[in-house]
Amino acid sequence: MIQVTAIFALGINHKTAPVALREQVAFAPEQLPEALRELTTLTSISDAVILSTCNRTELYFNGTATQAEQVIAWLAQFHAIDGSELQPHLYLHQDNAAAEHLMQVASGLDSLVLGEPQILGQVKQAYNQARSAGTVNPQFERLFQKTFAVAKQVRTETDIGANAVSVAFAAVSLAKQIFGNLAKVRVLLIGAGETIELVAKHLQEQGAGQLTVANRTYERAVHLAEQFSASAITLAQVPSTLADADIVISSTASTLPIVGKGMVEQALKQRKHKPMFLVDLAVPRDIEQQVAELEDAYLYTVDDLQSIVAQNLNNRLQAAEQAKQMIAVGAAEFAQWLTLQGSVDWVRDYRQRCEQVRTELLAKAANQLAAGQDAEKVLAELSTKLSNRLMHSPTKAIRQLVQDDEPNKQTLINTLLDL
């Protein structure tokens, strides 16, 4: 039995799995090129894009139902996870549902914080990485370009992005609730990517003035620190600087924890057990989970921020409904494009078959003329055979339509045969 190819969206996110499981299936940026090549090679799928963020890991691909099962098995194998442990937390969308899901993700409708803008850039980055790896073909090119257009429409024509909030904003909101005035609070930011930049921006807006940025690459730390009049250090200096921090917010792409329980324990002793507020926005985690066991250390992960995030949803729900309507239209337009592409293929194939018949009969007629046969007889035979060969399949299909008593058959036949 021939299986039809389809567009699939396979994933795990903050709604379906805890952070402990999500971090196990997260892809580090440097893993993606090889992962994409391995995925497409082992499963023979034609297109593949991997989106991996703090809150989700999603694989978009084009293949059959059997290949979809192979992709699930590959995901578990790649991350050395028991498939039976992973399976209950996965979701799999197909065709129109997959396109709608991608558009909802890119528009911020499926984010931890409804409408957060950062995800669109992450989807674009995932798409560009897949293009560089050679795993984006014309169909996915069209799908993602349509997705970006719809996401832009949602941003500009609804209030989904009004009063911008994000996981970063939620972290800063929690810090402000705990400390009140942030002017004299000392903040250590670990990482120098988009999330930490957003955190720094929100901190500055909330009046925080004593920021330190730590990063593996010192130059990047300096570059970000200069934007916010902050200090810059390397990750190697974090242990000796940690005791000075009242707030620690971390978001890096490290595969191993950067801040351990022992490091925080030592810092708290130096602080004479003055409380320390820590927020880990990274997946995999930057701060060891055991830090939460320490007295005077208050550790929050992205999962812990959900209650704060919920307070920001009310003013966006109406905008989200508008956005869903736009996405439904966008997905339908993409589906229509797919259908038209299929019809273009049918027309091309039919024309090629007719041309093959014409070429074959014309060559036979030329040979007959070269052999000295009567030209009028050869032309009559050519025209008869050409008509019969071209009419055979359509006539057979018409008879079948009549026998099957198809509705609107007369209109369909008249349209096809131009009668």
Image (spheres, grey):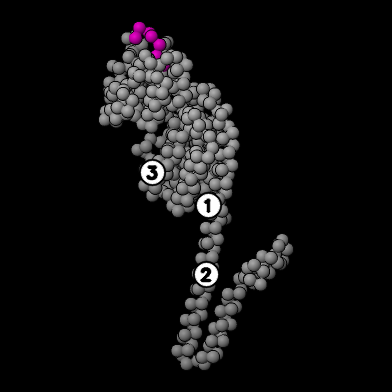
**Helix, strand or loop status at disc 3:** helix
Q: Could you tell which of marks 3 and 1 lies nearer the N-terminus? A: 1
**At label 3, which amino acid type do we have?**
Gln
Q: Is residue 77 visible?
A: no
Left or right placement of residue 173 versus residue 222 in this view: right
Q: Are marks 2 and 3 in contact (CB under 8 Å)?
A: no
Q: Circles 3 and 1: CB distance less than 8 Å?
A: no
Prevailing SS of the magenta stretch:
loop
Mark sitting on residue 38: none
The local crowd at label 3, few if under 14, some if 14 to 19, many if 20 or more residues have their Cα within 10 Å, is: many
Name the residue located 55 percent from the left edge and 43 percent from the top edge.
327
Tell me which numbered mark, 2 or 3, is placed earlier along the sequence: 3
In this view, the residue in front, 147 or 157, is 157
Residue labelled with disc 2: 351
Q: For marks 1 and 2, give the CA distance.
A: 24 Å
- Percent x, y of residue 224: 32, 29
Q: Is residue 185 above or below residue 87?
A: above
Numbered tag placed on residue 129 in the rendering: 3
* The N terminus: image quadrant: bottom right
Q: Position of residue 239 (x, y in %)?
A: 30, 18
Where residue 347 sits, quadrant-wise, is: bottom right
Give the SS element for disc 2.
helix
Rendered position, 358 above or below 132: below
The residue tagged 1 is 5
Q: Amino acid at mark 1?
A: Thr
* Foreground: disc 1 or disc 2: 2
Q: Give the amino acid at mark 2.
A: Arg
Q: State the CA–CA distance, disc 3 to disc 1.
A: 23 Å
Question: Which segment is the magenta one?
Answer: 271-277
Quadrant location of the C terminus in the rendered image: bottom right
Q: Residues within 10 Å of mark 1 (few under 14, many from 20)?
A: some
How far apart, in angstroms, are the residues tagged by discs 2 and 3?
Answer: 38 Å
